[in-house]
Image (cartoon, rainbow, N blue to C red):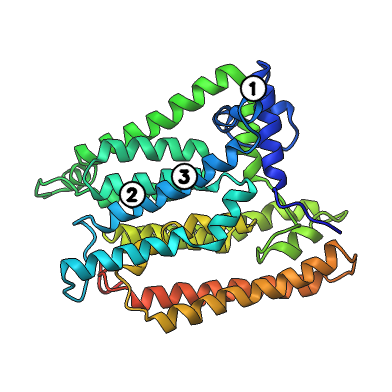
Amino acid sequence: MAVKYTDIDYVVFSDAARYITQGLSPYLRSTYRYTPLLAMLLTPNMWLHAAWGKLLFSACDLAIGALLYLALSCDALRWGGGLSPVARRARVLLLVCVWLFNPFAVNVSTRGNAESIISLQVLLCVYFMLSDRRTLSALMLGIAVHTKIYPVIYAPALFLFIPAGSLQPSSLIGHVRSFFSAERVKYTVVSAGTFFAITALLYVVYGYEYLFETYLYHVMRKDHRHNFSVYFYYMYLSGAPGIESASGVAAVLAFLPQLLLLVAFALVYHRDLCFCVFMQTLTFVAFNKVCTVQYFIWYFSLLPLVMATSSISLVGYGAMFLLWFAPQGLWLAYAYRLEFLGEPVFMELCIAGVLFFASNILIMLAFICKNRQLPLNKAA
């Protein structure tokens, strides 16, 4: 059975863009569950060339590479080892190549997935914060959260990265005033204001359907196909009669470990912003109820920033990649048997998902142990 290279998502994007050019709602296309702005960006698919969107996504990949070069050259990113300027520049270029020649990133964009757009927005948010342009960072955070809701997980770390007030607190009120410094409040207002302004404008145009398809659907989403999540088998079984009533409670309980880890990383590592954001992304993807290849791009685009300050050796990275990739190979083998041969290998897929989840946990521990930067609290 032949499998088309172009992802079905790209067909959905293009159909939604066609509705936009006709003055209609992109949500007339079933399964279009993204911001209308994405469909608007892809309207040239209709009148210029059908590959416009793929070229746009690939251009965002290149922009991420350029932005990584700027971020890795930023003084706020402290390098270890006393590298000379020439050696540092060579290492920066090598780390940028880790992203530019990443086969996963190339494949995802050229197949027509739009993850490079949100990855670029998140990286811009981090870069502007590192370069002390906080208003621009706040604007990009608001835009990123509008594009896909998940970047809201970075808000606590970005908030805490901004210095507290300079007042010497001698009372509870003093502590509160110091914590909610003017710069922190400004950042919160600008980022939240940007998000709500865009959301309100699009709500006026497209109504409740926009809110549901873009945001609410993803909260209750269940996807038991093409899914690396450790919750794969549970979600498959939860669709059986008599189990739906318990699925809501279980979904909330499954979210708690993810939430606790995201908060813990923000509290402990917010001063090391690049490492914190990377670990939060890796945590979010690994613990999420839905996990697909496209989501890997979210942390691959941040990986060079962490590699810059990590003491992991080249051999270590090779071992980590094998540890990360081997369970995927096993999962894909069983997924092929399920999808194309019709074999009932759900339990085998579940075991492969658990192995992949365990490999992500080990990789997270390795990054924590080998990170050169100091957390906020050494005791923590």
Of residues 74 and 375, the one drawn nearer to the viewer in this rendering: 74
Mark seen at residue 155? none
The crowding category of the residue bearing disc 1, from other C-alpha atoms within 10 Å (few below 14, some 14 to 19, many at least 20), is many
The residue at the point 21 percent across, 39 percent down is 183
- Counting residues from the start of the chain, the first of labels 3 and 1 encountered is 1
Mark seen at residue 60? 3
Q: Secondary structure at mark 2?
A: helix
Mark seen at residue 20? 1
Q: Position of residue 200 (x, y in %)?
A: 50, 22
Of residues 368 and 102, the one drawn nearer to the viewer in this rendering: 102
The reply to whether residue 306 is in sight is yes
Label 2 or label 3, whichever lies nearer to me, is: 3
Q: Position of residue 44 (x, y in %)?
A: 59, 28
> Which quadrant: the C terminus?
bottom left
Q: Is residue 151 above or below residue 15?
A: below
Whether pointer 2 and pointer 3 mark residues with C-beta atoms closer than 8 Å, the reply is no
Q: Secondary structure at mark 3?
A: helix
Q: Is residue 248 above or below residue 206?
A: below
**Type of amino acid under label 1:** Ile
The residue at the point 79 percent across, 55 percent down is 3
> Which quadrant: the N terminus?
bottom right
- Counting residues from the start of the chain, the first of labels 1 and 2 encountered is 1
**In whole angstroms, how far apart are the C-alphas of marks 3 and 1?**
22 Å
Whether pointer 1 and pointer 2 mark residues with C-beta atoms closer than 8 Å, the reply is no
Residue at mark 2: 126
**Type of amino acid under label 3:** Cys
**In whole angstroms, how far apart are the C-alphas of marks 1 and 2?**
32 Å
